[in-house]
Image (cartoon, rainbow, N blue to C red):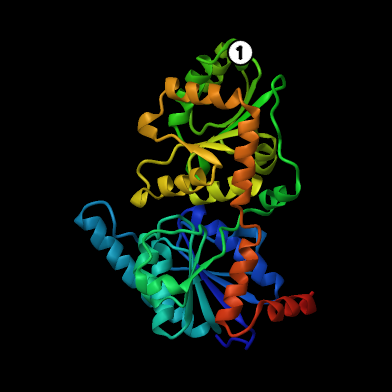
Amino acid sequence: MIRSKAKWVILAAGGTGGHMFPAQALARELLARGLRVALITDRRGGGFGPDLPQVETHCINAGAMAGGGLSKKLLGAVNLGIGFLQARALLKNLNGDVVVGFGGYPSVPTVYAAALRGRRVILHEQNAILGRANRLLAPRAWAIATSFDRVDGIGPADLDKVHVTGNPVRPGIAALASRPAAVADNEGPLRLLVTGGSQGAAVFNNVVPAAISLLRPELRQRIEICQQVRGPEIDAVAAAYRTCGVKCELHAFVENMAERLSAAHLVISRSGASTVAELTAAGRPAIMVPYPWAADDHQTANAQRLVEAGGGWLLPQNMLTPESLAERLDSLLSNPALLARAGRCARAKAYDRAASALADLVAAASGENGAETAARGEAAA
């Protein structure tokens, strides 16, 4: 296939939404600047769907080598090897000199093949601990874009490659920066948003209703809950809230997350990278319960960064009981000024230009500057 001489940027991402969301945000920004974008992903990543049909998408093999038995590790190694050969063949045809990897094993074959071909590689790390794939690839990177101002696991030789860009969030949530945040008072409703992120959090289904039932009646009657409940437990959770006399809305997936975040006085959530970025963008205080089996316990590190900034509270899952959560809820919901202050602290940690900052880094890697690419985008429009 013969390619035009138009500038291409190649994105390498796959697996969970935590890797795909920032890749999609960067793709949208690069397209607006008049660049052409290709995505190399695995079957789980699948692509950006109908939102960005301009992005040329290619699927390769990929597999994790961590966890599982010897046979699973060997299969992962074989798939990575096949993916490397597939990525190398694709890179011969794609006329791009910058490759951006978003972590996770699906990015490894493409980023490694790109580095061997002399392409400039940018790694984006969403979490407060450098992921295993990015750790492997960091020595070959031209730049490492981080979502937090402090990221553990980066070797001394790679520290000068670090650029703090932040983690892009969905456009609807990014727009909350210009809207006033909900502020609780001493008499009106108290709105809680309970979400487990893209993977859900079954532990919230039992613990949160039980904790609400332990609250003082005068506090409990003011609570309104929107909760993500996946699977067949939705009826049981609804019944538990009815018994408490609490108004609730339960959804398998919260479609209008921007609206829900904007209205919430307090969030109970996991602390994946996308969740933390959205909390800061919206300026919402949160009780964060890290997923205890996350690789390198990175969700705890993410939550700790927000706690250190005064924007939330950490409650490990092994300490999450109806009693401990009820005690925390009583102290927070009874103190609207504390919630408002934590929301402001969370908002202060937001990176509103994350996608633009990443695109500027791509421009620098390709020998241009942000103004040049932005000007080309305006001309294309």
| Residue found 28% across the figure and 66% down from its top | 77
Q: Position of residue 84 (x, y in %)?
A: 37, 74
| Direction from residue 267 to residue 135 in the image, left or right | left
Q: Residues within 10 Å of mark 1 (few under 14, many from 20)?
A: some
Q: Is residue 245 above or below residue 320?
A: above
> Which residue is at the front of the view, 299 or 26?
299
Q: For the C terminus, give its image quadrant.
A: bottom right
Res. 284 in view: no
Q: Nearer the viewer, residue 189 or 9?
A: 189
**Percent coordinates x, y for residue 198 in the rendering:** 51, 44
Q: Is residue 33 above or below residue 68?
A: below
Residue 366 as seen in the image, left or right of residue 158: right
Q: Position of residue 61 (x, y in %)?
A: 39, 66
Q: Is residue 21 visible?
A: yes
- Tell me the residue at 71%/78% (across/down): 371
Give the percent coordinates (x, y) of residue 45. Answer: 49, 58
Picture quadrant of residue 189: top right
Residue 58 in the image: above or below residue 308: below
Residue 139 falls left or right of residue 53: left
* Amino acid type, mark 1: Gly
> Quadrant where the N terminus lies?
bottom right
Residue on which the image places disc 1: 245
